[in-house]
Amino acid sequence: MSGPLAPPRVRLATLPTPLQPAPRLSEVAGVEIWLKRDDLTGLGLGGNKVRGLEYLLGDALARGCDHLVTGGGPGSNWAMLAALAARRHGLRATLVCYGDEVPAVGNAALAVLAEARLRFTGDPDRASVDRVVEAVAAELRAAGERPLALGRGGATPVGALGYATAAVELAGQLAATGVGPASFWLATGSCGTQGGLHAGVAWQRLGGVVGVTVSRPAPVCVERVTALARGVADLLGVPAPAAAPTVVDGHLGPGYGRRSAEGDEAAALVARTEGVFLDPVFGAKAMAGLLAATRRGEVTGPVVFLVSGGAPTLFTTS
Ligand SMILES: Cc1ncc(COP(=O)(O)O)c(C=O)c1O
């Protein structure tokens, strides 16, 4: 097989992000933990989605698109960052939100600041976003624009390239710090981040990835991660991972997008030991999953925990 292919990419992130030891957190957990600071990727208020957007925007520009259409909830980190990335590269942006129109606060307000247009589906079903994204793209096409329609989370093989290539960055950092074989823990929502990382760590021979699901049931995530990892390996021209992905259930709390008591406790521990904030929707619940696994003696370490951003939701999530 020839070497990895080089899909089109634009620059949005400040890379590499730091890989920091977390000694006081490690002492409490009884396991060596490192924090991969992807809350510091640099576009807007940072976050994991910026890595995938480098490839999604690269693809959009290569296809001559002039308008990005995507969506999520009005509080979606993904949608806000997609709008910022589009605007930064001169594309218009329309964000479709499920439910009835609500005042723009948090991520929605930040997207509006960047002149994204908001559209509400009027339907509380999250899947209504995907239907309306396609309908808006069709309207724009009929009006002579060249839209790129993306589903919630940007969870496509192209978007997942962001974390496949993050594995190359991590391989260099782990070699430089002398950390032994590590497992990688992260929050899993739309599965693009885990899909990319699963493919990337297999490619770089780095160890296992454990996703803590914060939205879909674990078996659904396993299927999605497997498919995305295969897709991204094909795009790179490298072998698909042989191992099935690991997805941990049981840390959703009262529901997607809502705080959980154990997540809040885990986030408070990380804030007071390491001075790092975990968002309540993703990072806090993933850390709760990691800490629960360490208490059960299931984790030997070292662990690299992905701090995936979501800063705007620190102030808006109840
Ligand atoms: C802050 C944050 N962390 C983690 C995730 C999960 O990433 P993915 O949707 O790729 O599974 C998201 C998704 O929006 C996010 O915004």
Image: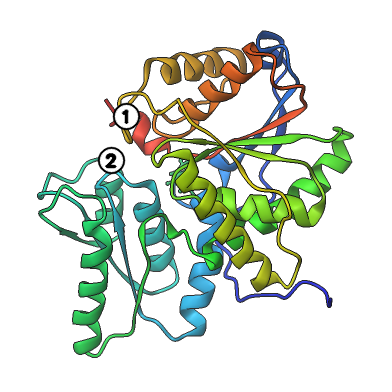
**Looking at the rendering, which quadrant does residue 270 occupy?**
top right
Q: Which residue is mark 1?
A: 315
Residue found at x 73% / y 75%: 5
In the rendered image, the vertical position of residue 131 relative to residue 137, given as above or below: above
Residue 63 % position (x, y) = 47, 85
Local SS, label 2: helix
* Amino acid found under the numbered disc labelled 2: Gly
x then y, percent, for residue 48: 53, 47
Residue 62 left/right relative to 23: left
Q: Residue at x 52, y 52 (%)?
A: 223
Residue 315 visible to an observer of this rendering = yes
- Color encoding of the figure: rainbow
Left or right, residue 24 beside residue 175: left
Figure label count: 2
Badge 2 density bin: few <14, some 14–19, many ≥20, Cα 10 Å? many
Q: Residues within 10 Å of mark 1 (few under 14, many from 20)?
A: few
Q: Look at 54% across and 47% down and name the residue there.
A: 222
The answer to whether the residue labelled 1 contacts the one labelled 2, judged by CB atoms less than 8 Å apart, is yes
Residue 106 is labelled as: 2
Q: Quadrant of the N terminus?
A: bottom right
Specify the label residue 244 is tagged with: none
Residue 260 vertical placement versus 233 (above, below): above
Element carrying mark 1: loop
Looking at the image, residue 242 lies above or below residue 157: above
**34 or 108: nearer the eye?**
34
Q: Position of residue 213 (x, y in %)?
A: 47, 37
Q: Is residue 42 visible?
A: no
Identify which residue is drawn at 70% across, 16% down. Answer: 26
In this rendering, position of residue 13 left or right of residue 83: right
- Tell me the CA gap for discs 1 and 2: 7 Å
Image-quadrant location for residue 114: bottom left
* Amino acid under disc 1: Phe
